[in-house]
Amino acid sequence: MVVSSLVLTASGCGGAAADPEPSVVHVSGVACGRGTIGGGMVVERGLVLTNAHVVAGTTEVGVLFADGGGAVDARLVAFDPNRDLALLAVETAAAAIELGDDAPGTSGRFITVDDEGALDERPFVIRRGITATGEDIYREPGARRRALEVELSVDPGESGSGLFDADGRLVGVVFASSRTSDDLTYAVARSEVEAFLAEPRSDSVDPGPCV
């Protein structure tokens, strides 16, 4: 997991509709001669959302769908090092997911996929909304984003995986684990995801340098 140098301060967030079976993926790539891995989910038909730091500096990226969905090549079409979000274009018929309510007290499932396509699910509870300020994924100053402090334990390589409420709606995207507590995790908030998905995309985007 990558933790950028951010200052965290408290607050809250808002809602949407339902898809009980989100389509989740394992993301892998090659950056500066080494492998990178993370998670992701189909947010629109043919588009996978993950963390920017998972695909930063990559020369090739692929996604593996859960439960036998197979592996496919991916192309980077949007990249935001401040929000730590990226969009990958893929060949898939998987349906889009909805965005849910990320208010404090919201609970649900953290869903990730390993490198063989097996699903792993863990319960989570959103503790509070926070404002993360400081550096972006490249240690450049001036980054600021809405985030969530979540009661959840995650492992290295699970960045970019989603937090889903009881109706399968996406409420956050995990980007870092706590440096002080094994049971505390940080996620990009729904409002940042929504704003990112509303921005223009390109046929091909520079993934920047490695992190």
Image (cartoon, rainbow, N blue to C red):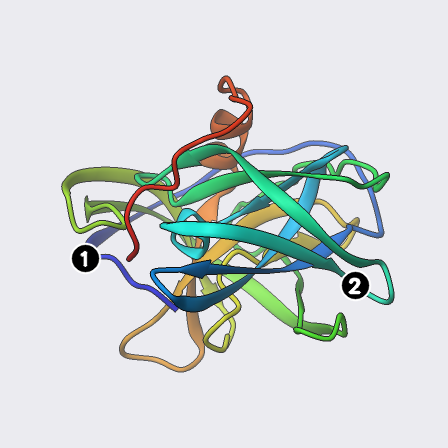
Residues under numbered marks 1 and 2 in contact, where contact means CB atoms less than 8 Å apart: no
- Residue at left offset 55%, top offset 34%: 14
Q: For the residue marked with disc 2, what is the amino acid?
A: Ala
- Residue at left offset 63%, top offset 33%: 15
- Residue at left offset 36%, top offset 50%: 57
Name which of mark 1 and mark 2 comes first in the sequence. 1
Query: Which quarter of the figure is the N terminus placed in?
Result: bottom left
- Above or below residue 193? Residue 171 is below
**What label sits on residue 66 in the rendered view?**
2
Q: Residue furthest left?
A: 141
Nearer the camera: disc 1 or disc 2 = 2
Front position in the image: 204 or 86: 204
The image shows residue 121 at horizontal and vertical percentages of 70, 72
**What label sits on residue 5 in the rendered view?**
1
The image shows residue 76 at horizontal and vertical percentages of 52, 38
The image shows residue 118 at horizontal and vertical percentages of 76, 74
Query: Which quarter of the figure is the C terminus placed in?
Result: bottom left
Task: State how many labels appear.
Answer: 2
Q: Alpha carbon of mark 1 to alpha carbon of mark 2: how far?
A: 32 Å
SS at mark 1? loop
SS at mark 2? loop
- Looking at the image, residue 9 sits to the left or right of residue 115; the answer is left
- Looking at the image, residue 208 sits to the left or right of residue 76; the answer is left
Front position in the image: 152 or 53: 53
**Label 1 CA crowd tier, 10 Å (few <14, some 14–19, many 20+):** some
Q: Quadrant of residue 181?
A: bottom left
